[in-house]
Amino acid sequence: MTVKLSRPPAFSKIPSLNHCPSSSSRFPTSFSFNCWFSRRISCQKMSCSHEDTPQTLQTITISYSELKDKDLDLSTKIEDGFGPNGLGILSVSEVPGFPSLRQNLLHLSPRLASLPEEVKKELEDPQSRYNFGWSHGKEKLESGKPDILKGSFYANPILDIPTADTSLIQRYPSYCQPNIWPRKSLPELELAFKSLGKLIFDVGLMLAYHCDRYASKGMTRDDEGFEKILMCSRCHKGRLLYYFPAEQSDYAQDAGSISSWCGWHTDHGSLTGLTCGMFMRDGVEVPCPDSAAGLYVKTRTNQIVKVVFQEDEIAFQVGETTEILSGGRLCATPHCVQAPKGEQTYGVERSTFALFMQPDWDESLNFPKEVHLHQELIPPNGVLTFGEYSEKLLDKYYHSKS
Ligand SMILES: O=C(O)CCC(=O)C(=O)O
Ligand SMILES: [Fe+2]
C-alpha cells in the first residue's frame, strides 16, 4: 500500500520564519536559504544499514495550477516535501503537455542505446569527460569499477552553445562545451530532449519561486534567491538514462541490494527534475514487473523509503548545491534505483530523464563548516565556484583529465 507522508511525530511543526537579512550580491552564498528552516539539521551519511522491506510512500504533490499562482502560499507543501520531515522530493501534477513529451523522449532511449557501437562512439565527448553526448561505462562507482549498468545521453536543453570563450571551455568543459546531437542517426532526439528539458525547467523555476517565497516570508521581495540563480545560469544539464536489461548487466553481486541499478548518491546541482521511469521490453512499454523496483530515497531521519509518483507528474529533489547555499538547513536527497528481480523481468529495460538545474559555473559556493559533503575537495578558505566544484567531483567519479 502506498501512503502519503505527512509530518511524522518525530518532529514538531517548524515555527514560522522570521525576517532574513537580504543580500545584494549577485551570487549570495547565505541568502534567504538560511531562513528556510529554523532548526539546524545534520545531514546523514549514506551508509545504508537496514535494507529490509522499506515503506513505499507517495510524494507530496503540488498541482500545476497551484504552482502557477504566484499569490498562493505553498509554504506548507514545500515544507512537507523538502523540510526536515519530508522525503526531500515532491512532485508537480497536471503539467500541460508533459505526458506526451515524456512518452516521446523516453521511447527514444532504447533506440539510442541500440545504435551501432561506432555510431555511439561518435556521440562521445572525452573532452568534457563524457558530460555531453553518449556516456556508457565511463563513470566510476564507489567501488572504483566502471558503471556499465546504464547508458546516458547528456545535453544542455536550454543552450546549445553556452559560451564561445575558449578559456572558459578549457576551464569548465563539462558545462561549456557545445551540445552533441545525433542529427543523422536519431534526428528526433534533439527536439524531444529540448522540449521535455525546457518544460521541466520552466516548472522547476516556478517551484523555485515558491521556495524563495517560503524562505522570505515577511520580507520585501528584492533579494536574489533560488529562482534568480537558476534563471540566470548557463549550466543546466539534461540526462536521458537507459538502464540495460538485468541479465545483460553485470550486477549479480548486487542483485539483492536496493541500489542494484543505480548506487546511492546525491545530485550535485540545486534541484533535479525527474520523470517517472518507464519500463520496456524491446522498446515496447510494459508494466513495472517488480513492485520493489524503482527509486528509493533516504530521509532526513535515516529511513530508506521507496518513493512513488505518477507517470504524469514531474518530481523534484534537492541537490548538494542547495545544501551548501542553505548552510546545511536543506539537505541533498540521497537516492538510488533498484533493478527488478525475478524471471519475468528478463529483457526489461528502464528509461528515465533527469534535469539537473544548477547554478552558473561562476557562482561562488561558500562551504559552511556544518556541511560535510566531499570535504576532501574543499580548499582551506572554503570557497569554490560551482564550476570548480563540479570539475573536482568529476576527478573523483570519472577518469581524470588526460
Ligand atoms: O533513474 C532514476 O530514476 C534516477 C537517476 C538519477 O538519480 C540521476 O541521474 O542522478
Ligand atoms: Fe541522481
Image (tube, rainbow, N blue to C red):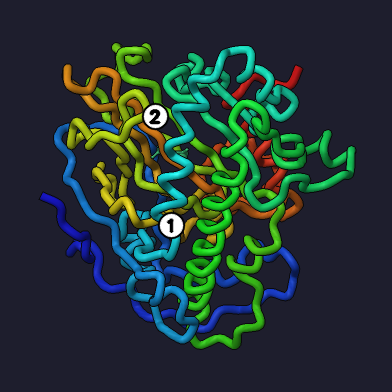
Tag 1 residue: 98
**Front-most of residues 136 and 298:** 136
Q: Is residue 124 left or right of residue 249?
A: right
Q: Secondary structure at mark 1?
A: helix
Q: In x, y percent, where is residue 260? A: 32, 24
Q: Is residue 172 left or right of residue 145?
A: right
> Quick check: is the Cβ at mark 2 less than 8 Å away from ligand 1?
yes
Of circles 1 and 2, the one toward us is 1
Ligand 2 quadrant in view: top left
Q: Quadrant of residue 268?
A: top right
Which disc, if any, is residue 262? 2
Which is nearer the N-term, disc 1 or disc 2?
Answer: 1
Residue type highlighted by circle 2: Cys
> Is residue 25 visible to the viewer in this orientation of the structure?
yes
Q: Residue at 42% across / 39% down in the picture? A: 352
Q: Secondary structure at mark 2?
A: strand
Measure the alpha-carbon separation of dots 1 and 2.
25 Å
**Front-most of residues 151 and 95:** 95
Q: Residue at 89% across / 39% down in the picture? A: 167
Q: Residue at 56% across / 52% down in the picture? A: 195
Quarter holding the C terminus is top right
Q: Residue at 39% across / 54% down in the picture? A: 99
Q: In x, y percent, where is residue 130? A: 64, 27
Q: Is residue 305 left or right of residue 147?
A: left
> Is residue 369 visible to the viewer in this orientation of the structure?
no
Q: Is residue 66 left or right of residue 151?
A: left
Q: In x, y percent, where is residue 290? A: 18, 32
